[in-house]
Amino acid sequence: MRLPLPQVEPDPTLPRSVTVYEVGPRDGLQNESTVVPAAVKAEFVRRLAAAGLGTIETTSFVDPRWVPQLADAEEVLGLLGDEGRGARRPVLVPNERGLDRALTAGVGAVAIFGSATETFARRNLNRTVEESVEMFRPVVERSRAEGLWVRAYVSMCFGDPWEGPVPVARVVDVCRRLMDLGCDELSLGDTIGVGTTGHVHRLLAALDGAGIGPERVGVHFHDTYGQALANTVAALRDGVTVVDASTGGLGGCPYAKSATGNLATEDLVWALEGAGVSTGTDLDALVATSTWMAGHLGRPSPSRVVRALAGG
Amino acid sequence: MRLPLPQVEPDPTLPRSVTVYEVGPRDGLQNESTVVPAAVKAEFVRRLAAAGLGTIETTSFVDPRWVPQLADAEEVLGLLGDEGRGARRPVLVPNERGLDRALTAGVGAVAIFGSATETFARRNLNRTVEESVEMFRPVVERSRAEGLWVRAYVSMCFGDPWEGPVPVARVVDVCRRLMDLGCDELSLGDTIGVGTTGHVHRLLAALDGAGIGPERVGVHFHDTYGQALANTVAALRDGVTVVDASTGGLGGCPYAKSATGNLATEDLVWALEGAGVSTGTDLDALVATSTWMAGHLGRPSPSRVVRALAGG
């Protein structure tokens, strides 16, 4: 397969290089209804690595009752061997029990999943925001004691389906608490995809004012309202250099009302490589991987780049 | 219908207001395979106007043999009466014959459709770029003599499917010639959707250097590679305040390999109103209009906002 590549005209307002934090195997598959065998998941991670993606979140040690799709975390990591370990192969750990499993599996990096809003903390974690921070404290402390790299997701940073717009000050407060636990990096999630560029700018400025500079921050946009790439570019102009994306746009069905699709890695890479921002990735290989995975999922990729180059 | 609206956090890098140049009834429908009756087209324009869209390109006086969908231009304008006339209801005129028809129909504004590349000029207009400019000369002169407002579309401003990347200098040269004819506004088209933000910036800077400032320029992005909104925001940061968009994302099938969909007006409005940029439009009414039109076309809207708010 020989595909057209983006035409390069450098954008002087963007950084020279960006780290794509690939969430397809975890956040992407977690939201797919078709259960994928462990061997396919391991092969997915291998293909993503071969396509040049440095950081790949491989799986989740969440309770299998809540996310059956990822009940095979140990099996996937076992199949991956050393390819699934190290500081650039994080796994999600919801709590200490998940951390125990992750440590047994020999991971080198973990991610915790917090909430900026009380309602989502209650619904997702069955705790208040403050109680959830206390739940994460031993997870982060033990992870650091084991030498693991730690990321903290913060969901609902822009809007919340129950609470509406989320005040920037509240997001900053939660972020500050999580960083104070000792996390290495934050991922700011627009879980329902409602944010726009001014909101992105204001939140990043407020975080910077609270001592959390853009070098500690990744952004995680969903394309529910078509804003994911525009918001990502806005964040990059403000100094962010880590962007979460999902190869093929996996995660959430694009045809359903509840569409919550992740930014597609291919669409991000097109934007960045075209603007002279190095991502280290091979677009052909990413598109081929999405096409291969679409076959396993039984539906076309929602990525615009994949559709344009491979016909879906 | 009572829908969620974007959360407003002003973006200080964007203009205070933007004119949405609605292309759905012409550029959108032109690319739809389902033929729509004239009465539905007229009602579409009326609904768009009621939703607050100031400028609406209503139809095209192209030869009906080439675009059967728009063969009913006179009928549509007849049904619209005064609502389809005036300086903010342009119609496309490909040549003097089209202008004759448009003048007979009593229009107040016209748009011509040029090309930045020789290959597309040859394929679309059966002329060289220079010959096409000469073909447009009497169209623009007569239009101005009649007191009409004149827009010049320039297609293939970023990439061309046969020639590849299009040099900025060539685009500037064509734009300069068209403006020298006496046009009021340019519309820079990324017809195949390959451009990225650095390319947008460089082209706008080069045009400004050639005496065509952003106040004379509209931008027209296609979402083939998912770049339309990010590129639009980049253009707005450089001073552009006119953006072409198509309600519901009409134009080109999003499910086909040849997807060439226009930026959806709803997704643009979400981005702009959320960033504190006034568009004067009513998002509920736009979404309702897209849902209504989707019923006539027999397929869901590709707009992400429409899908999120109305389930497609």
Image (cartoon, coloured by chain):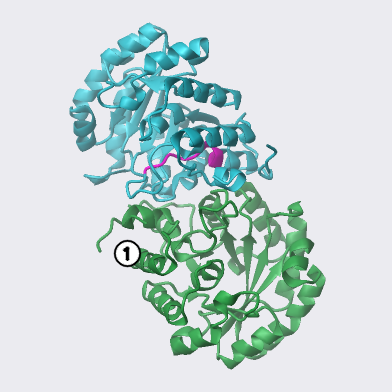
Chain colours: A cyan, B green
Q: Quadrant of residue A168?
A: top left
According to the picture, the residue beneath numbered tag 1 turns out to be: B284
B7 vs B235, left or right, is: left
Across and down, in percent, residue A297 comes to: 44, 35
Q: Residues within 10 Å of mark 1 (few under 14, many from 20)?
A: some
B267 vs A13, left or right, is: left
Name the secondary structure under disc 1: helix
For image coordinates 42% across by 33% down, the residue present is: A28
Front in this rendered view, residue B118 or B33: B33
Is residue A301 positioned above or below B34 on the image? above
Is residue A239 positioned above or below B229 on the image? above
Q: Identity of the amino acid at label 1?
A: Asp
Across and down, in percent, residue B106 comes to: 55, 91
For image coordinates 48% across by 44% down, the residue present is: A302
Across and down, in percent, residue A24 comes to: 45, 31
For image coordinates 70% across by 73% down, the residue present is: B179
Front in this rendered view, residue B305 or B258: B258
A273 vs A86, left or right, is: right
Is residue B139 visible from the viewing direction of this image? yes
Across and down, in percent, residue B52 comes to: 39, 72
**Magenta highlight range:** A260-268
